[in-house]
Image: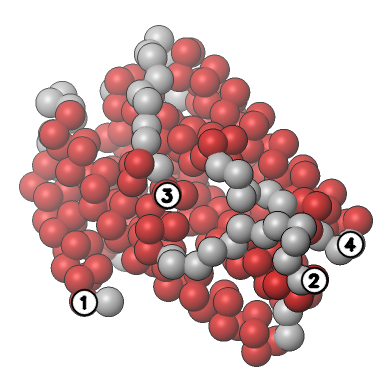
Amino acid sequence: MVISRIKKTWHDDLVRDPETHAWVLSLYRAGEFHPQASDDYFPAWAAESAELRASIERHASDEIRHVKIYDRAIERLGQTRTEIEGLDVFNVAIREHTKVDFRATREMSRDTVRERLAHFLAHAHFLETRISQSLDYHLEACERSGRTEVARVVAAVHVDEERHTSYTLAAVKDLLPASEAARVLAVHRQGEARANLAFSARQVRSFLRRFRTSRSHALVYRVSAKMMEASLAAL
């Protein structure tokens, strides 16, 4: 309950100022752009079924479209995009905390390719689940603040993210025996949980350092960052 209230306040503060709002939209955008800068995302060729192949291809296409959607939303705020890189990209943070190689090549055995594909889809599942949860808070904040144009953008992306979380989970369970699917999902669940703590604390500190106009809850945010870092250290 306390975490939920802090997140609600956090997103309300973010959307209140166009500059901070554009910054958080840039963070969301960076995650959507990451697949275009990576050569091991969305290996549709590795899917054995036409249905899964089509879902992966659609997912990749959605991410490209989301980048453009976020770009337009930032422009409508009258702001410029913040260039995000390294551990400020949530995908990169997750990969830092999940030491699993999901790169698949055509030279690998069928079983290895299937396992690598399952690892990628598990990675995508927990990534998309966390983003979907974040967008819930952000959409509500946009609606409360009257940012109707951005709310429409976030709502459109949110619909896609919900579909992504569903098919990726189903695919992992379909690709692997039940015990192996559970193991793979656990690895990525734990990695994403660690990454979320590290990433969130990092962004709170970045927010407090970068922006001087939205500091009414600065003490709460500093304490929350310290709590997240302590929780990470305890894992």
Q: Which of the two residues, 47 or 29, is positioned nearer the viewer here?
A: 47
Residue 178, relative to residue 122: is it above or below?
below
Q: Calculate the distance from the C-alpha at mark 1 to the C-alpha at mark 2.
A: 38 Å
Q: Earlier in the sequence, mark 1 or mark 2?
A: 2
Which of the numbered marks, if any, corresponds to residue 110? Answer: 2
Query: What residue is shown at x 86% (from left), y 63% (from top)?
Result: 48
Name the residue nearer the viewer: 230 or 97. 97
Q: Earlier in the sequence, mark 2 or mark 4?
A: 4
In the image, taking residue 133 as reference, residue 160 lies left or right, namely right
> Which residue position is annotated with label 1?
234
Q: Earlier in the sequence, mark 3 or mark 1?
A: 3
Q: Give the alpha-carbon distance from disc 3 to disc 4, as whole Å.
A: 29 Å
Question: Disc 4 residue type?
Answer: Ser
In this rendering, the label closer to the viewer, 2 or 3: 2
Q: Is 17 on the left or on the right of 169, as rendered?
A: left
| 1 or 2: mark nearer the eye | 2
Q: Secondary structure at mark 3?
A: helix
Q: Residue at x 38, y 63 (%)?
A: 97
Q: Is residue 79 visible?
A: yes
Q: Which residue is disc 4 drawn over?
A: 49
Q: Position of residue 171 (x, y in %)?
A: 74, 67
Return the residue found at the far front.
Answer: 107
Place of residue 180 in the rendered image (x, y in percent of width and height, measured from the top left): 64, 85
Q: Report the front residue among 157 and 170.
A: 170
- Tag 3 residue: 92
Q: Is residue 166 visible?
A: no
Residue drawn at x 33%, y 46% is: 87
